[in-house]
Amino acid sequence: MKPKALPVLLTVLMASSAAHSQSSVTIAGALDTFAGRRQLSGGPQLTRVESGGMTTSQLVFNGVEDMGGGTRAEFLLGMFLRTDSGSPGRFDGDAFWGRGSYVGLANEYGTVRLGRQSTQTFVNFIRTNSFGDSATFGPAFVQTWISAIGQGSQFLTPGAPPTSRTRTAPLGTTDTAWNNSITYASPNLGGLVMGAQWASGNAAGVGNRFGASAFYAAGPLNLSFALESIGNASVPASGPAAAVIAKQDTYLLTAAYAFPWTRVSAGYFETRRDYATIVDDKVKTAYVGATIPIGPNAIMWQTAWSKQAPDSSASVRRTTTSLGYDHFMSKRTDLYAVYMRDHLTNNGNGNSVAVGIRHRF
């Protein structure tokens, strides 16, 4: 976009909002950058300045039109970006609107949206997670969604595709959002919100995806359940054995309770992978965490344990623990410090230390 284009765009949006008071467009996002040393189990120590320590940096456009009679139209265009380099996306090759891109309709009976959208599993995960959506220092996030091939060769079994497999992060090649999806979210039914999602394979021989969820909130208690099923050849061929996964099913249970002095949270993932040419396996991940408020600030802790167990040979285990402190300088700007320890079977410990700043707008 040319330098003069954004002011023109904003002027058009504001003029449209003034002329049609039932419509609105909101620009929001977060910029997050940290400096420190990051090391995963069995990997090298890397000193770096990097984007997205506690929140993946992002820019989001939301729009709503009230059409009367309790019905409204809505849209979202959201992109990830890297503040350390100014590059778009979470990584090279990431979709420009990878955060989300959808249109939808909502009324008293619920909301229907079409486009690229966060999965039911991911939405329920971050609702209760003590480290939120931290893809860098959140133990359960790292062990579930960050592609194993990007974390290091020690997180892959020996050999080359199609005989190798990932030892961790079973959802690392399916992403936290699905393309070509349709979702339905129910209205709030006494604290219970239910959802369903279907995503088309959009190509011959590529299976569809399906997800469902339920989230219950009553006072200090939150409970959730989510599942997702990935059809044949629907897992992108971006990691070992991805092309030979015939089917993949994931289940998630989470809970959180806010005591007067702390909010405790816990969860359990189980992913069952059905391969076309090698022995099937399961990856199980359990995690527990807490958020302890200190005035407007907070201490955060989480430990996650994963086990990858084929039907034959030995299982592989991973334990990751993070401890952090979040200091709010204002309602929108906070400073944070975090320590993470990571250990994988037959590998040395990985130790990470970082400080960062996050600004929401």
Image (tube, grey):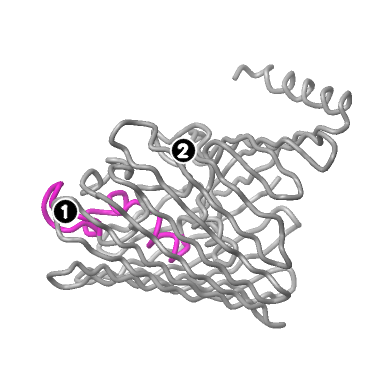
Q: Position of residue 99 (x, y in %)?
A: 54, 41
Quarter of the view holding residue 284 = bottom left
Q: Residue visible at 75% across and 57% down?
A: 330
Q: Position of residue 204 (x, y in %)?
A: 31, 31
Magenta stretch: residue 243 in it? no
Nearer mark to the viewer, of 2 and 1:
2
The kind of residue tagged 1 is Ser
Decide which of 231, 310 is in the foreground and name it: 231
Decide which of 62, 251 is in the foreground and name it: 251
Quadrant location of the N terminus?
top right
154 lies above or below 107: below
Q: Is residue 332 left or right of residue 194?
A: right
Disc 1 designates what residue? 164
Quarter of the view holding residue 74 = top right
Q: Position of residue 182 (x, y in %)?
A: 54, 41
Within 10 Å of the Cα at label 1, are there few (<14), some (14-19), or many (20+) other Cα atoms?
some
Q: Residue visible at 30% across and 62% down?
A: 272
209 lies above or below 103: below
Res 179 label: 2
Q: Are marks 2 and 1 in contact (CB under 8 Å)?
A: no
Q: Secondary structure at mark 1?
A: loop
The kind of residue tagged 2 is Asn
Decide which of 249, 55 is in the foreground and name it: 249
Q: Residue visible at 17% across and 58% down?
A: 157
Q: Is residue 215 visible?
A: yes
Sequence-wise, the earlier of marks 2 and 1 is 1
The magenta stretch is 137-166
37 lies above or below 298: above
Magenta stretch: residue 155 in it? yes
201 lies above or below 108: above
Q: Position of residue 7 (x, y in %)?
A: 74, 22
